[in-house]
Image (cartoon, helix red, strand yellow):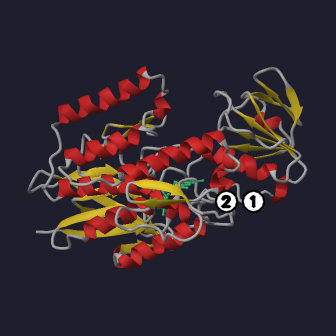
Amino acid sequence: MTMKVCVIGAGAAGLAVARHLASNPELFDFVVWEKSDTIGGQWNYTEDVSSKDGVHSSLYSNMTTNIPKEVMGFPGYPFHTEGSSFIHHTEVQNYLINFVDHFSLKKYINFGYKVCEVKPIKDELSDAVKWNVSVMKIGCKTVETDQYDNVIICNGRYTNPYIPDILGMETFKGDIIHSHYYRKNVSYVDKNVVCLGRGPSGLDISLEIGQVAKKVFISHNKSNLESPLPDNICQITGITRMNENSITFNDGQTFQVDSVVLCTGYMFDFAFLHKDCKIKIQENRVTPLFKHFINIEHPSLAFLGVPFTVCPFPFYDTQAKYYIKYLEGKADLPSKEEMYADEAKDFSVRLESGLPVRHAHFMSTRQWGYHDDIYQLGSMSGTAVSKVLRLLYDYIHQTRVKDLANYKKLSYVVEGDTFKLKN
Ligand code: FAD
């Protein structure tokens, strides 16, 4: 008997799932629904940000990766070894296109279909939960519904911008965009610009705008960056209020400002989930999820890619491998009570360490232990990220912190158990 599986999204996460599902064609009869007309998700760069259907990708024109390609690839399918460690986004898109060809995945993907509802229903014969998934062809209003045994959601986490509520924002006469819509620095020539937020995109965009702007203020309430910054870029506290042509910051200073880029992150968007899926989002925490990805109430519904500050492709591979092993009946899930206890413990450890609720899925150095836990749970041998690649990833993090403007100028080679600078 086959198992019908629905995958939502043909970005890196959906492709990781498709690769492993495709390796067991006797068991899995699966389909990937993808709303755009090509693969790649975020890496499918869109120059035009005015589409009435919405903009999926947040990548900007000159964006290069902030993780070295030596670490970034899927296990068993590395990036090419030539050239720089930090590559232009088009190379990543090409890598994903080649990945799809290599594993013959295209035949499973239905492009141009947007999933509009996922709803659990009780199968009358077996009493098991099945899933009604409704899709709409882009450009048409007709909805088709099909039934599946499992649904794996891989719709991405960087598409629904978080817009903070700032006093006086409506009175500000300059331009304000969210970083989701930032593409090039040309409109910032000789301007005074505030980039609000100092996450990876905020810093990258600040540096890029700083190449042409008169002044860039990186506004944030975190501890100050250790890295030296170009002379026309400075750090300042968060925003108290926006005025017509200026901004007042939390430290009381007010500066004339022409433009603001809100690098304030993203909110999860699972609008297509029927309430019976029993998934709640509170302060950007998705719950109840075992190990940040399996719906504890309905384990036949999983979400890949919820955690952030991870090395994404290997992370998705680990989640996909374990989940598919579970579907194959080769790995067990703990009891419902144990999964709830595990989720609660994970969350309370985060809160105790001072993280806010919205960082419930923040990983950073926790990601390596996560891989190990999942491999152990699934009795899987090996690892998605070897020791040397973990070391390289952590080392790059340190070089980034120390010298934001220059860390991508160095490249690395991995040889056996060590890595070294490339000549
Ligand atoms: P996405 O790539 O977002 O894919 C989701 C897919 O689902 C899309 O194709 C979308 O069209 C589809 N979809 C969504 N909703 C529906 C629906 N209702 N119906 C049908 N289809 C749907 N990662 C790195 O490894 N290295 C980096 O250097 C790096 N830099 C980044 C820089 C920026 C600015 C950003 C925003 C992200 C960066 N990332 C980086 C993270 C990147 O997002 C991940 O690498 C990865 O591409 C995410 O894959 P995903 O499949 O989870 O989501």
The residue under the point 74% across, 48% down is 207
The residue under the point 21% across, 45% down is 376
Name the spot of residue 275 as percent of width and height, x first. Answer: 35, 43
Q: Quadrant of the C terminus?
A: bottom right
Report whether the residue tagged 2 is closer than 8 Å to ligand 1.
yes
The one of 88 and 271 positioned closer to us in this rendering:
88
Q: Quadrant of residue 343?
A: top left
Residue at the spot of label 2:
60
Name the spot of residue 46 as percent of width and height, x first. Answer: 63, 66
Q: With 249 as the anchor, is 398 left or right in this view?
A: left
Report whether the residue tagged 1 is closer than 8 Å to ligand 1.
no
Asked if residue 372 can be seen in this view, the reply is yes
Name the spot of residue 321 as percent of width and height, x first. Answer: 27, 57
Residues at discs 2 and 1 in contact (Cβ within 8 Å): yes
Question: In the drawing, what numbered circle is on residue 71?
Answer: none
Rounded to the nearest angstrom, the CA distance separating label 2 from label 1 is: 6 Å
Establish if 287 lies above or below 31: above
Q: Regarding mark 1 in the picture, which secondary structure is present there?
A: loop
Establish if 115 lies above or below 159: below
Establish if 422 lies above or below 171: below
Residue type at the position of mark 2 = Tyr
The residue under the point 42% across, 48% down is 390
Of the numbered discs 2 and 1, the one sitting upstream in the chain is 2
Residue type at the position of mark 1 = Lys
Q: With 231 as the anchor, is 357 left or right in this view?
A: left
Q: Quadrant of residue 291?
A: top left
Pointer 1: residues within 10 angstroms few (<14), some, or many (20+)? some
Question: In the drawing, what numbered circle is on residue 184?
Answer: 1
The one of 276 and 291 positioned closer to us in this rendering:
291
Asked if residue 115 can be seen in this view, the reply is no
| Figure disc tally | 2
